[in-house]
Amino acid sequence: MPKIETVLNEGVIVNRAWLKEKRFSRSAIDYFLRSGKLKAVSVGFYRKPGPQLKWQNIVYSFSLMGYRIHVGHSSALNYHGFQQFLDFKMKDDVLIYSDKKIPKWSNTIVKNGFIRQSSRNPFNDFYDNGLIDVPFGTWDWPIKYSTPERAFIEYLAALSMREEVNAALLMMESAFNFRPALVQELLMNCKQVKAKRLFLWMAKKNNHKWYKYIDQKKINLGSGKRQIVKG
């Protein structure tokens, strides 16, 4: 049986299924808990004793446990330099997408933000185009983030107020270096008509050069008129 000290890094949370995959028996896990080598974070979730964790530790840990999880929406836009257009009240929020529900205890052990899971994913949970790995911590653990192109579509998918639409339109002014091939692929795989229509309308209104390379015939834009906000 391997040693827990060499298998589990400090700052990582794992569950019993993960430990079992690493060939630790139930009795071994119970021994680690009694001896203080492991600490229970919640029922069925464990870590080495150590300092308070950051939200990045949480996101990385769930990716290790098999969650399809990434940082997206306004949090990814903030990372990519669009923060001047975002609501300052959301700056401490970390918006993530995951194929499984993140347990509520996650936010009781972090010190640098509040993790919010979005329920409006405009893409299929298993669609990973437009995601990049961003290194975190001493060991450069990879955390998946949406690219600016994908994050913008995720942001548009959740808009409901005129002020948000106006802010997004201003944000699109800075999207002059979006990659048309990636935009095309993302729009073709986006499930939400509202996000696709808004994206293309804003790109055209800002007269971006890459807009002319988008083949709208290959994108399902629905039929009829749609209203996002009144007027």
Image (cartoon, rainbow, N blue to C red):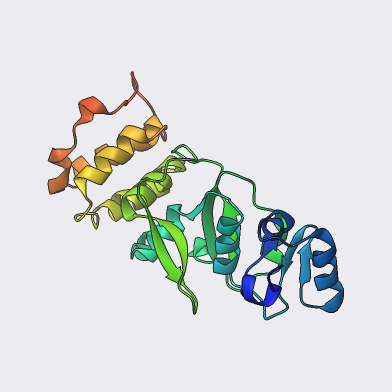
x, y (%) of residue 187? 31, 37
Could you tell me which residue is drawn at 47 percent across and 40 percent down? 126
x, y (%) of residue 108? 71, 66
Disc tally is 0
- Farthest-out residue, front: 1
Q: Quadrant of the C terminus?
A: top left
Could you tell me which residue is drawn at 45 percent across and 54 percent down? 72
Could you tell me which residue is drawn at 58 percent across and 72 percent down? 112
In the image, taking residue 123 as reference, residue 94 lies left or right, namely right
Is residue 87 among the parts visible in the rendering?
no
Using the image as rendered, state which of residue 11 and residue 163 is in the foreground.
Answer: 11
Residue 195, by quadrant, is top left
Residue 144, by quadrant, is bottom left
Is residue 121 among the parts visible in the rendering?
yes
x, y (%) of residue 220? 32, 25
Using the image as rendered, state which of residue 153 and residue 188 is in the foreground.
Answer: 188
Using the image as rendered, state which of residue 192 and residue 203 is in the foreground.
Answer: 192
Residue 76, by quadrant, is bottom left
